[in-house]
């Protein structure tokens, strides 16, 4: 019994140690190549003229994601033409969250007239590479000689309901700074949203 407990604790320790870590500003943003709601595979290479990207992990079902949806649409409308388009990624496992299936994603994108990619991360490989933990969870990137550098990560702003924003758009301010050749004054904030829904795996 004693040996069993020791082995179990060791396995738990490995499991905890293997947990993904959220990428931070200054790090290289991993490549993205995922299926879009139109059935085509989309990645950074589809936007050769982009200066960077607003990568947002979001979904259909989370109340926070729904609350931020219009603001995400507005970010793309405002900054895509200036070189910073939105790329939205659904990180939720549809087995755990049926409302986040690929078919439901297609329905939502059509209903809301998304003008940006809405990608399905099957197996949550990209989600784990970025260390996204919430919906929504944003990563602002900028092209450089070294690749895509993460310049900001966290929330869009400090008010999910959008009625009492005390700190003006974190993301909006960050993109504006990059467009003027400056570094964002705030590079990280706490992502506000629901936990990413992952399938349970046995130890």
Image (cartoon, rainbow, N blue to C red):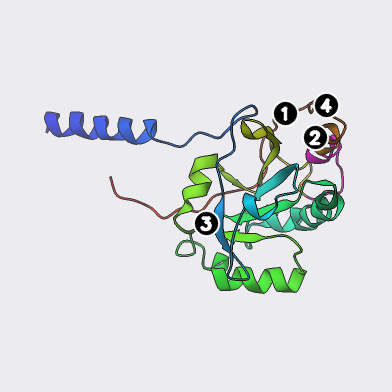
Question: Is residue 80 visible in the rendered structure shown here?
Answer: yes
Residue located beneath label 2 in the image: 174
Badge number at residue 187:
1
Q: Secondary structure at mark 2?
A: helix
Q: Secondary structure at mark 1?
A: loop
Q: CA distance from mark 1 to mark 4?
A: 12 Å
> Are the residues at dot 2 and dot 1 in contact (C-beta closer than 8 Å)?
yes
Q: Is residue 78 above or below residue 176?
A: below
Residue under the image location 70 percent in, 68 percent down = 109
Compare marks 2 and 1 and give the one earlier in the sequence. 2
| Snapshot quadrant of residue 178 | top right
Q: CA distance from mark 2 to mark 1?
A: 8 Å
Place of residue 69 in the rendered image (x, y in percent of width and height, measured from the top left): 75, 57
Mark 3: few/some/many CA within 10 Å (<14, 14-19, 20+): many
Q: Nearer the viewer, residue 138 or 37?
A: 37
Place of residue 5 in the rendered image (x, y in percent of width and height, measured from the top left): 19, 32
Q: CA distance from mark 3 to mark 4?
A: 32 Å
> Are the residues at dot 3 and dot 4 in contact (C-beta closer than 8 Å)?
no
Taking the magenta stretch, the answer to whether it contains residue 166 is yes
Residue located beneath label 4 in the image: 182
Answer with left or right where residue 54 lies relative to residue 101.
right
| Snapshot quadrant of residue 132 | top right
Q: Nearer the viewer, residue 47 or 85?
A: 47
Compare marks 1 and 4 and give the one earlier in the sequence. 4
Mark 1: few/some/many CA within 10 Å (<14, 14-19, 20+): some
């Amino acid at each position: 019994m004693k040996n069993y407990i020791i082995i179990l604790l060791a396995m738990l320790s490995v499991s905890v140690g293997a947990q993904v870590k959220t990428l931070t500003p200054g790090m290289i943003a991993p490549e993205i190549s995922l299926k879009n709601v139109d059935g085509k595979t989309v990645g950074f290479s589809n936007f050769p003229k982009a200066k960077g990207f607003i990568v947002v992990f979001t979904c259909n079902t989370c109340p926070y994601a729904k609350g931020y949806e219009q603001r995400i649409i507005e970010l793309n409308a405002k900054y895509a033409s200036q070189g910073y388009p939105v790329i939205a990624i659904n990180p939720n496992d549809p087995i755990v969250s049926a409302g986040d299936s690929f078919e439901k994603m297609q329905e939502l994108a059509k209903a809301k007239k998304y003008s940006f990619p809405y990608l399905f991360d099957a197996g949550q490989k990209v989600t784990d590479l970025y260390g996204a933990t919430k919906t929504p969870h944003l990563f602002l990137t900028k092209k450089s000689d070294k690749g895509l550098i993460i310049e900001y990560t966290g929330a869009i702003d400090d008010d999910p309901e959008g009625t009492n924003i005390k700190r003006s758009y974190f993301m909006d301010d960050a993109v504006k700074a990059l467009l003027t050749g400056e570094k964002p004054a705030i590079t990280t904030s706490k992502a506000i949203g629901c936990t990413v829904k992952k399938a349970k795996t046995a130890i």
